[in-house]
Amino acid sequence: MKSAIRVLLADDHGVVRRGIREFLEEENDIQVVAEAENGLQAVELTREHQPDVVVLDIQMPGCNGIEAAQKIRLVIGQAVGILILTAYDDDPYVLAALEAGANGYVMKSADADDIVQAVRDVNEGKRVLDPSIARLVGIIQAETGPTDLTERELGVLAWTARGLTNKAIAYQLKISPRTVQGHLASIYAKLEVGTRTEAVTKAVQLGLISIPSHDV
């Protein structure tokens, strides 16, 4: 028999946490092991309890859900799934959350069954996006298949999305402009595109990178 999915809930409203906990724990395969009322507490409790999935609200005092997701990724790495559960469907929030390492982004208005399934999917390593969010940011929710872009190529793509020149990217990554050019050529071939703009656009659609925002 498979062990229950261990979940940590983080929301600054106790009533909301209780409501989410109640319908999650109605499921035999889910156990809520801890609750946090702010982002920093979520990070500490994640370190302490080692949950399988952390469910984060965005707007919390002291440290919001996006910042908490970043810290959890730094502390725990990829060993924990992160699900954003929020009332905010603004493009900058969605992109910032995915950039921070969230595996899923679901609206609080979703049905309880959908939220339960999102927890299960995130636990299995799947990306979960509310249908309205998927349309908003242009990310296809269906399986897109694996990509063989290297970590360095993803780094080059991320800086390319910020509009940096090859020389500026080389400075940021401490490599030569010629090496950057080589990485871009490889990226174009793997993504089957011919320009920087096409590469960035397709990478965003595949969920490989997100467009930077300074609005969060």
Image (spheres, rainbow, N blue to C red):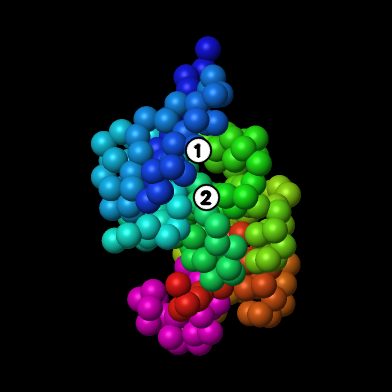
The magenta-colored residue range is 153-175
Q: According to the image, label 2 marks what residue?
A: 85
Task: Determine whether 29 is above or below 164 in the image.
Answer: above
Q: Say which mark, if any, is on residue 37.
A: none
Circle 1 SS class:
helix
Q: Nearer the viewer, residue 149 or 186?
A: 149
> Residue drawn at (33%, 52%), measured in percent from left and top?
38
Task: Determine whether 60 is above or below 174 in the image.
Answer: above
Q: Residues within 10 Å of mark 1 (few under 14, many from 20)?
A: some
Q: Residue 162: horizontal and vertical position, in percent?
A: 51, 80
Q: According to the image, label 1 marks what residue?
A: 20
Q: Residue 161: horizontal and vertical position, in percent?
A: 55, 77
**Amino acid type of disc 2?**
Leu
Q: Is residue 153 visible?
A: no
CA distance for labels 2 and 1? 10 Å
> Residue drawn at (54%, 19%), measured in percent from left and top?
28
Q: Residues within 10 Å of mark 2 (few under 14, many from 20)?
A: many
Q: Is residue 102 visible?
A: yes
Q: Earlier in the sequence, mark 2 or mark 1?
A: 1
Circle 2 SS class:
strand
> Residue drawn at (26%, 45%), measured in percent from left and top?
44
Direction from residue 215 to residue 200 in the image, left or right: right
Q: Quadrant of the C terminus?
A: bottom left
Name the dominant secondary structure of the magenta segment: helix
Asked if the residue under mark 1 is in contact with the one under mark 2, i.e. CB atoms within 8 Å, the reply is: yes
Magenta stretch containing residue 84, yes or no?
Answer: no
- The quarter of the displayed image where residue 114 is located: top right
**Amino acid type of disc 1?**
Ile
